[in-house]
Image (tube, coloured by chain):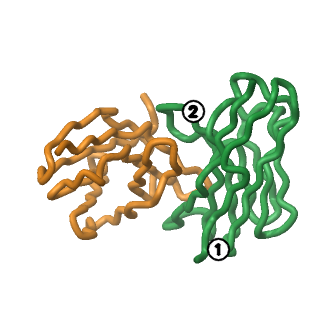
């Protein structure tokens, strides 16, 4: 089945130790998004790629970086995780941007920072 | 005022009941509207897109009122498996999808 896959599903890291989360999609969608979601809060957009064009949200900390080496894969790098970065990280895709384009989410990676 | 507002609930309803959620949005230029369902510690899953004419999918009916800037979700004949958080999502025609914080539904046996 076409889908959005995230690995790992659970990630435990130490304070300050870099971590990379991955996302892949078989939907051949142009747009890939990374969201951070904390308990009882709405997902917060960190950045998105429209094809190869990277678009950062103004309030995304520099600690968060992303790479999209090809259409199918996208990575989220957290350079120096702090305790406040513990959250669910959701990858999503959409065929295009704009009207009528639904987003499809991966199962998420739950990050714990010790 | 938040861009997308939802009553957080929880809405506790007995099995078989009909329940309705509303969601208001502040940007009159909003163009696409969606309802997602999110189970505890899982990802949001698309429940339905909301069209101007309203749309129905089985027990679920969504309505859009552009004049009053709200969308609604009606669930008929609630099942225990409908227990989840329902997220209202609004898109302004760009890359940005604005999420409400969700309405929690508990269907009780």
Shown in orange, the chain is B
Identify the element where label 1 is drawn. Answer: loop
Residue at 27% from the left image edge and 53% from the top image edge: B73
Say whether mark 1 and mark 2 are on the same chain: yes
The residue depicted at 73 percent of the width and 28 percent of the height is A113
B54 relative to A75 in the view: left or right: left
- Crowdedness near tag 1: few (<14), some (14–19) or many (≥20) residues, C-alpha within 10 Å: some
Q: Position of residue B90 (x, y in %)?
A: 46, 51
Quadrant where the N terminus of chain B lies? top left
Q: Pick whichever, A92 or B65, lies toward us.
A: A92
Q: Is residue A35 left or right of residue A82?
A: left
Q: Between A62 and A5, which is closer to the camera in this rendering?
A: A5
A101 to A89, vertically: above or below: below
Instruction: Find disc 1 in the rendering and name its residue.
Output: A27
Q: Chain of mark 1?
A: A
From the rendered image, report the letter of the chain displayed in green.
Answer: A
Residue receiving disc 2: A38
Q: Quadrant of the C terminus of chain B?
A: top left
Q: Position of residue A56 (x, y in %)?
A: 76, 44
The span from disc 2 to disc 1 (Cα, nearest Å) is: 27 Å
Q: Left or right of A44: which side holds A58?
A: right
Q: Which residue appears at 25% of the width and 68% of the height?
A: B56
Residue A13: quarter of image? top right
Q: Secondary structure at mark 2?
A: loop
Residue B52 sits in quarter: bottom left
Task: Work out whether residue B55 or residue B1 is closer to the camera in this orientation and state it.
Answer: B55
Residue B51, given in percent of the width and then of the height, sits at 34, 66
Q: 10 Å neighbourhood of mark 2: few (<14), some, or many (≥20)?
A: some
> A101 or B47, which lies in front?
B47
């Amino acid at each position: 089945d076409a889908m959005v896959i995230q690995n790992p599903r659970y990630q435990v890291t130490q304070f300050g130790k870099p971590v990379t989360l991955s996302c892949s999609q078989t939907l051949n969608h142009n747009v890939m998004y990374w969201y951070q979601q904390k308990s009882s809060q709405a997902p917060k957009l960190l950045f998105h790629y429209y094809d190869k064009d990277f678009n950062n949200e103004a309030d995304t900390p520099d600690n968060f970086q992303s790479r999209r080496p090809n259409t199918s894969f996208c990575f989220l790098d957290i350079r120096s995780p702090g305790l406040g970065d513990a959250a669910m990280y959701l990858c999503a895709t959409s065929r295009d941007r704009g009207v009528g384009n639904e987003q499809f989410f991966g199962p998420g990676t739950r990050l714990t920072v010790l | 005022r938040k861009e997308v507002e939802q009553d957080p609930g929880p809405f506790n309803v007995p099995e078989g009941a009909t329940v309705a959620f509303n969601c208001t949005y502040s940007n009159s230029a909003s163009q696409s509207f969606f309802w997602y369902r999110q189970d505890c510690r899982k990802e949001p899953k698309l429940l339905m897109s909301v069209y101007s004419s309203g749309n129905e999918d089985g027990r679920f009916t969504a309505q859009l009122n552009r004049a009053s800037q709200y969308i609604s979700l009606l669930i008929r004949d609630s099942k225990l498996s409908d227990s989840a958080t329902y997220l209202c999502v609004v898109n302004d025609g760009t890359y940005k999808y604005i999420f409400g914080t969700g309405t929690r539904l508990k269907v009780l046996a």
